Image (cartoon, rainbow, N blue to C red):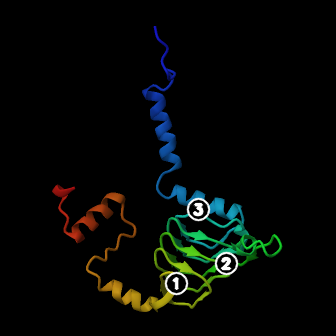
Amino acid sequence: MPRQPYPALLSGEILWRIRKVFLEIFRPGRVQVLRVKWLRSIGVRIGEDCMIASDLYAREPYLVDIGNRVAIGTGVRFITHDGGAVASRRGPECRIYGRIVVGDDTFVGVNSLILPGTIIGRDCIVGAGSVVHGTVPDGSVVVGNPAKVVMSTEMANRIAVRNRNLVDTRGLSREEKRRRIMERLGIGEAST
C-alpha cells in the first residue's frame, strides 16, 4: 500500500478543531484587541477606544503617540526616521528622527504615510493614500501627496450628512448591517 503524503491525523475532526481555534483567535474584534496590545507592548503609546487596522509601524515605536478614539486604516505606515543622510554617503552613519503624534478623534485613511516629525491635531481626517509631514491643525481634512488642508472636519461632516448613501450601522449585527446597507443602496437580495 503506498504511503499517504499527509498523516491520517488530519481527519475531519482534527480539521474541525483547528478551524474552531482559528475562528476563536481571529473572531471579529479579537484581532483588533491583540494588535493594540502588541503595539503597546513594543512601545507605541495608544489612547483608549482606538481602532487600528494597520500593524506597519516604525522601527522606533516609542516615537509614536496615538490619542483617544483614533481610527487608523489598513496599510498606514508611520516612518519615524529619514535615512537620506546615510544614502548620500557624505555624512556620518546617522539618521534624522522625529516623533509622530496623532490627536484625539482622528481618522487616518488606508495606505497613508506619516513622516517623521508629524503632528496631526485633534478631530482630523487624513484621506486615503496621503503623505503627511509637518503640523496638521485641529479640525482639518488633509489629502494628497504632499497632504494639504482641503476643508474643515465640520464641513466634511456637513457634506457627509447630505450623502444619500450615509448609513448608520453602529451596534448592528453583521447580518443587520448587510441588510441595512443593501436596502439603502437599492441592491436586491436576488442580485447577490
Looking at numbered disc 2 in the image, what kind of residue is underneath it? Answer: Pro
Answer left or right for 172 relative to 108. Answer: left
Q: Residues within 10 Å of mark 1 (few under 14, many from 20)?
A: many
Is 118 placed above or below 93 here?
below
**Sooner in the amino-acid sequence: mark 1 or mark 3:** 3
- Return the mark for residue 116: 2
Residue 38 in the image: state x and y as whole percent: 65, 59
Secondary structure under the numbered disc 1 in the rendered image? loop
Most foreground residue, 140 or 176: 140
- Please identify the quarter of the rendering in which residue 115 is found: bottom right
**Sooner in the amino-acid sequence: mark 1 or mark 2:** 2
Residue beneath the point at 70% across and 78% down: 99
In contact (CB < 8 Å): disc 3 and disc 2:
no
Looking at numbered disc 3 in the image, what kind of residue is underneath it? Answer: Asp
Residue beneath the point at 53% across and 83% down: 146
Residue beneath the point at 50% across and 43% down: 22
User: What residue is disc 1 on?
Assistant: 147
- Please identify the quarter of the rendering in which residue 91 is found: bottom right
Most foreground residue, 20 or 116: 116
Foreground tag (1 vs 3) = 1
| Cα gap from disc 1 to disc 3, whole angstroms | 22 Å
Residue 187 in the image: state x and y as whole percent: 20, 64
In contact (CB < 8 Å): disc 1 and disc 3:
no
- The quadrant of the image that shows the C terminus is bottom left
User: What residue is disc 3 on?
Assistant: 55
Looking at numbered disc 1 in the image, what kind of residue is underneath it? Answer: Ala
| Cα gap from disc 1 to disc 2, whole angstroms | 14 Å
Is 191 placed above or below 48 here?
above
Foreground tag (3 vs 2) = 2
Is 151 placed above or below 37 here?
below
Answer left or right for 36 relative to 154. Answer: right
- Return the mark for residue 183: none
